[in-house]
Each structure stands twice: as C-alpha cells, then as structure tokens.
Amino acid sequence: MYTMKIKELCKSYKNSSFTLQITDLSLEAGSIFGLLGPNGAGKTSLLKLLMDIVRPDRGYIEILGHRPSEREKLQAKISYMPENKNLYHNMTVKKMLDYASGIIPGWDNDKALELKNIFPLEGKKRISTLSYGEKTQLYAILTFARSADLFILDEPTRGLDPIMQEQMLQLIKEKSGQGKTIIFSSHQLGEIEESVDSLAMLRKGHMVLNGNLDDLKSELFLLKLEKSKISAIPPSTLDIIATHHQHKQSLILCQGGMEARQKLQADFAFLNPENVNIKDIFLILMENGGEEE
Amino acid sequence: MSLLIKELWDLRWRGTILLFLTLLTGYFVLSNYEWFKTVADIAQIEQGLKQAPFLNQLFDMETLNQQLLELFNNIDFYIWSQWFGKNLYQLILLAIIILTFPLFARETEQNTNYFLLSNRTRKQIFLSKILASFFSIFLIIAAGSILPVIIALFNEFNFSLEQALMYGLQLSISSLFLYSVVVFFSIIFNDVIKPVIASVIVFVALGLMGKISGMLYLNIYRYMTGVDIIFTSSIQTTAMIVIFILALFILMGSWYIFKNKDF
C-alpha cells in the first residue's frame, strides 16, 4: 500500500528560475523516507506540495489516498513540521500548547506531557525568547503529540544539540515502529543513513536518485581512479551513474551488483570497486553538480 | 482555545484600546454639549457670516443666522455633526486599519501560517479571521452608535434609538466595504507595512473621488457620517445594497486569492 504517489509533478515560482520536476515517486506505508539535497534543491517545496501549502503547476500527487487539496480529509492524518519553526512570539510556551490542543486534530494530552519531559521547555517562557533549537523542540511536541498516519518533517533536527537530535531520531523510529510513515528532509547524512528505509536525492529541482537504502547500497559501487587511467576502461564496460573529479582522482559512481563488480575486477585488475555509503553518493551527485552520465 | 478564540485573543489589546478610546471620546463629546455651547463664540460666527459676500448674495443673512442658532441649540444636530459626522467615523476608520491590516499579512511575514495551514483548512482559517476581526469592528460600531442613546438617559436630552440603529447599520455596511479592501491587501501582501500604506492610499482616494462633481456617490465617507439620515430620516437603501454587494465581491476575491495562494 502506498502512502504517497507522485507523477509528472512540476512546480515553478514567479520571479525565480527554479523549477521542481519529479517524474515518478512513490512511498510505501510504514516506512521512513529521507529526502536529501543541497540548499535550494527543492526539498521544502516538495514537502509543501504534499501539505497543499503550495500548489503544483501540473502533475499528480496522491497522499494517503487523497489529493493534497482535500485538506478536510487529510488534516487529522498528517502531522507536519515546517522548515521554518516560527510560532506566535507573543505567546508563552504554555499558552502555545494550550492553543495547539484546541487547534491540532487528534491532540493527545498524555503524549504532550510525555514529550514535555523529553523536551524540557519552561512553560512561562515567551516564544520570542526561545532559541532556534528550543523552537524546534516546541515544534517537536506539537508534531508528535497527536495521532497521525503520516509525519512530514522538514529538517527536524536542525538547531538541536546532539542529545536532542538523538531524542528526535528516537521519536521518528518510535513512530515508524507503530506503523506510521515518516518523510523527513535533512542535511545530516549520518542521521539519514541511520534512520531511513528509502531515500530520494534532489538537485536543482530534479530527483537524481531514489530507492530503498539497502538496495541502493547493494546496487551501487564506487571506483576511485587516477584521471589518467579512465581512458583505459571502455565506456560500455561501466554503468556509470555520475562522476566527480577531484584534484588528481576521479570518483565514479556505478550501478551493478556483486557479479558486475567481480567481472569488472577480473577484466581490469587495477580497479577496486568499493561499497558506497550515503555520504559518497551525496558528494558525487551533488558536489560541483556531479556529472550525470 | 479554538481558532476563532485565538483570533479574538490576538485582537484583544487593539480591540479593547479602540473600544475604550471610542467610549471615552464619545463620553467626552456627548456629555459636554452645554460646555461646548459656552466655549463656542456665537457672536463671532454671526459676524463672520455677515462678512462673507458670497453667502450674503445667496441667503437672507437674518434667516441664516436664525437657522444657525436653532441648529446650534439642537442637541440632535450636535450629535450628528460632532459625534457621528466627525469623531466616530474617524475612529472607525482607524479601527478598520488597525484591526485588519495584520490579519493575514502578519502570519505570512512571521511564517506562523504554516502552523495554521497544516492543521486547519484554508476555509476555516479565512472564516475565523474574518469573523473575529469584523466582530471586533462591529462591536466598536455598535457601542459608538448606541452611545448617544445611553448617554441621553443620564442627561437632560433625548436621542432617537431608531436613528441610532439606522446610523449603526449604515456605518456597519460602509465599514464592511473598507474592511474588505484592507482584508484584500492583507492577503495579497506578505508583510504588514504594505497593507497599511495601500489601505491609506485607497481611503484617501475614495475621499478625493467624492470631491469630484458627479462622483459624490463614490464618497464612502458621506455614508459613514450619516448625513443623509439627518435629512431623510432613512438609510440610503440603494447605495447600501451596492456597497454591500461590492464588499462581498471584494471579500470573495480575497478568499479566492487566499485559497490559491502559495505560502
């Protein structure tokens, strides 16, 4: 069963050359989905499209069996933490939580109390005096103290100290353990690698990689080559995803399972296919644009 | 706290201060009629009229003076000219701008709209904001319109409740039109300064249009002062219907923009 389906999605903005284009993306229920990309890649735009905060120019989005514009049917099922975690600065933390309890569908007071122990914020403190990290903690309470089937989190750990980051990741895993679907964007490659089941990488509004994390790791490998040796390999030998040229070395991200790697090593003894991690993939695809083949 | 209560909570200080200011100004103006008569120098006004050649050509000065004195001693005229026709409608203009300009624009400027948009439908957000803010304005209009009747109970004069209600209705409809203009600006702009500037420009332009011969009907302030009610003892039904429809049209346009806006 799919939680989200996107087909031929396109979104552009006035006075901006940026266009988000996603041809095909789907997400299975109950999984943790990571959205990666450099600043301005379109992660926040995509999440806003899912929340109907911005509207697509064209394309199809289905979320929990509904179109995003069917907010009445979706508002009790989706919990959203935006990138910008501003709340009403003239309210105190306590007032904001009181207000949220009346606004947020499916608010759970017991869960809110539990979360207040994890994120210990002073109730009397005005929101205007909170640091960015504290605002994120307050938003975490608002986001998780409710029943929802889907949690959309835009950079949920930004501004948090390592202890709070860990708490946040635990919450995400806890929700996933309860069968909830999580979509979250992050710049923290480590936390994505640690938490997600599947991921997508965006660059300049285009999805450059998408898939199950374990599958990606087994299907992709990395070659580190001196630039002078590249010409020794016939192009048809490799299924190259992207290359990234460093000072004297080229990093080549290739597609192929264990068999392909063994064959490659047998044919070219000087090649040493290496396993990849998200950091490698991200750097090759994103750094300096990453030359797609 | 529901969405509507939160909107009223947001308006609590501005609304209370404006209501208090209206009541205080009204009390000062309406309770001091006798004092006002003592400070106004009638003899000097008469002298000034006699020396105006233009008026001398048009009117019989003796009759004019007589009528002026009658008006001057008429509490109804005083209430219509000094309270409804001057102070109250100006306070309402102020209230419309102050209570409405940040309605949507502040949420956009401070990015708090994400919290609302992710938890409530756009229709719920729009309606709660509109209801809360216009209710606050209407409360001030109602208090200001009925104030002469209440103050009359404690003083030695009478004021028609019927006329007060007619004025209140006409002022409410006229205010709804100006309110809809400010709502429109609050939605289309993403900061709180531009709606204020744009509203002030439109408010001034509407007043200026009324100065042009043949376009007096466009002067919304004519209806807000209630000048027609004094002379005809009825509200301007046709104008009110047109203004009401225009206000609804602008509000529906604002809703359409809000419904489809990217945040």
Image: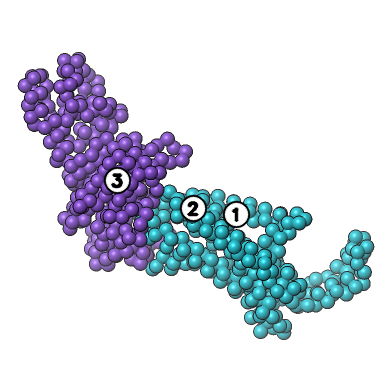
Chain colours: A purple, B cyan
- For the residue labelled by badge 2, is the local secondary structure a helix, a strand or a loop? helix
The subunit carrying tag 3 is A
Residue at figure coordinates x 40%, y 48% from the top left: A55
Image spot of residue A167 (x, y percent): 21, 53
Mark 1 — on which chain does it sit? Answer: B
Q: Are marks 1 and 2 on the same chain?
A: yes
Q: Secondary structure at mark 3?
A: strand
Q: Which numbered tag is attached to residue B199? A: 1
Q: Position of residue A56 (x, y in %)?
A: 38, 45
Q: Amino acid at mark 1?
A: Ser
Q: Are marks 2 and 3 in contact (CB under 8 Å)?
A: no
Identify residue for label 2: B257
Q: Nearer the viewer, mark 1 or mark 2?
A: 2
Q: Is residue B228 left or right of residue B132?
A: right
Question: Where's residue B162, x and y in %?
Answer: 66, 79
From where the camera sits, is residue A86 visible?
A: no
**Disc 3 residue type?**
Ile
Earlier-in-chain disc, 1 versus 2:
1
Tag 3: Cα neighbours inside 10 Å, few (<14), some, or many (≥20)?
A: some
Q: Is residue A286 above or below residue B170?
A: above
Quadrant that contains the C terminus of chain A = top left
User: Residue sitting at 66 percent across and 74 percent down?
Assistant: B166
Mark linked to residue A195:
none
> Along the line of sight, which residue is nearer the eye, B50 or A116?
B50
Give x and y (percent) for residue B35: 75, 76
Label 1, label 2: how far apart the Cα atoms are: 18 Å
Q: Are marks 1 and 2 in contact (CB under 8 Å)?
A: no
User: Label 1 to label 3, Cα distance in Å?
Assistant: 42 Å
Amino acid type at circle 2 is Ile
Rendered image: mark on residue A6: 3
Q: CA distance from mark 2 to mark 3?
A: 26 Å
